[in-house]
Image (cartoon, coloured by chain):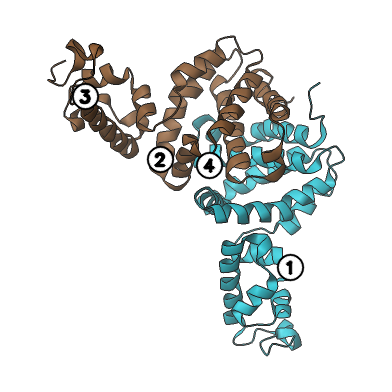
Chain colours: A cyan, B brown
Amino acid sequence: MASTDSPGNGGRRGRRPGDSGTREAILDAARARFSGEGFRGATVRAIAGDAGVDPSLVMHFFGSKQALFVAAMEFPLDPAEIVPRLVGPGVDGLGERLLRFLLGIIDELGEANPMLGLVRSAVTHPDAARMMREFLGEAILDRIAAAIDADRPRLRAELCASQIVGILMARQILALPELAAADRELLVGIYGRTIQRYLTEPLASS
Amino acid sequence: MASTDSPGNGGRRGRRPGDSGTREAILDAARARFSGEGFRGATVRAIAGDAGVDPSLVMHFFGSKQALFVAAMEFPLDPAEIVPRLVGPGVDGLGERLLRFLLGIIDELGEANPMLGLVRSAVTHPDAARMMREFLGEAILDRIAAAIDADRPRLRAELCASQIVGILMARQILALPELAAADRELLVGIYGRTIQRYLTEPLASS
């Protein structure tokens, strides 16, 4: 709250001149730090320093490092809200819930899906791959792993991620024809069972 | 055999000067045509024309359009040999056979895996995505679909592809830590069952 730009005293009552410029400066600094140092390496303190503001102002504007990342990458959804909502009712039926949500979002967003941009960057730039790995890990996979009541919860969450990224690649980027044209509820059933197996069934076949 | 460069009369007995230059000219022409017009649109006749040789010489050197593509893209393996070998014993156990082969190849090739280059291009260039979709379709997915004795064989082959591309993305490009470190035989078991389900089990859950 040391910064003179802090809206702490009045920001909630209305937007003051300069707020949006400050917000943009923080987002620019965040994008640069996240790209260069990964999600984990980029600290709120360093981002605030680059933007010339106090770290508390960054937290005031965005609430958390994850939310700052979501805003900087222009995600339409915040995993900190979505994942607990999907995981909340428990792991029973989580596979289908996850798939129905994901396929809905994929179809609705189409080419505007920011996950596509992130996948494109990750595939071509190792720094972006690290950034995506670290953000996915903390924002999504750790949260799913925490809900799993079975051995190797984090591996199970990563198995789910491998099928979900594969759906995005096959249906939207490669556009394999039968998969792209398939009825969404059929795919919810097929892939939902795969995800459910990764979440709850024994991993070893013996 | 109209071309004066044709090795038809003596090529089998030894390499003549000019053969490797001709071969390179054909490969260059193939890469350009495949990139611009996709795998399906690029004809052997057009590629031969660009390289200034007779189409029969292209077939003499490479044997098929698929094999020409494999050579032009510098694949270390030809799906026309690999897929029938994996599919040959039937669909029983095909999931595990496919996964054991794939994970072996992925680990062995590492960063030199030409699939990574193809995925990188496909993700960033729609023309390359089309080329990969068409080649994968004819060289791999149609062959697997032909071996499937169940409803919607081509959709099933595409479901398998979605999990396999996802493994490549998650294990090698994103390098999710537990998946990257997991015992290969454990993954053969887990993913093999997924692929087997896509190949042979009922698609609808009802």
Q: Pick the residue in front: B130 or A123.
A: A123
Residues flagged by tags 4 and 3 on a common chain = no
Alpha carbon distance from label 2 to label 1: 39 Å
Left or right, B12 with respect to B178, comes to left
The percent position of residue B75, horizontal first and vertical second, equals: 43, 30
Q: Nearer the viewer, mark 4 or mark 1?
A: 1
Q: Describe the element under mark 1 as helix, strand or loop.
A: loop
Q: Describe the element under mark 2 as helix, strand or loop.
A: helix
Identify the mark at residue B128; answer none if there is no mark: 2
What subunit carries mark 3? Answer: B
Residues flagged by tags 2 and 4 on a common chain = no
- Are there few (<14), some (14-19), or many (20+) residues within 10 Å of tag 3? some
Which residue does the numbered mark 1 point to in the structure image? A64
Which residue does the numbered mark 3 point to in the structure image? B19
Q: Pick the residue in front: B63 or B145.
A: B63
Which residue does the numbered mark 4 point to in the structure image? A172
The N terminus of chain B: image quadrant: top left
Left or right, A114 with respect to B74, comes to right
The percent position of residue B170, horizontal first and vertical second, equals: 62, 41
Q: Amino acid at mark 1?
A: Ser
- Are there few (<14), some (14-19), or many (20+) residues within 10 Å of tag 2? many
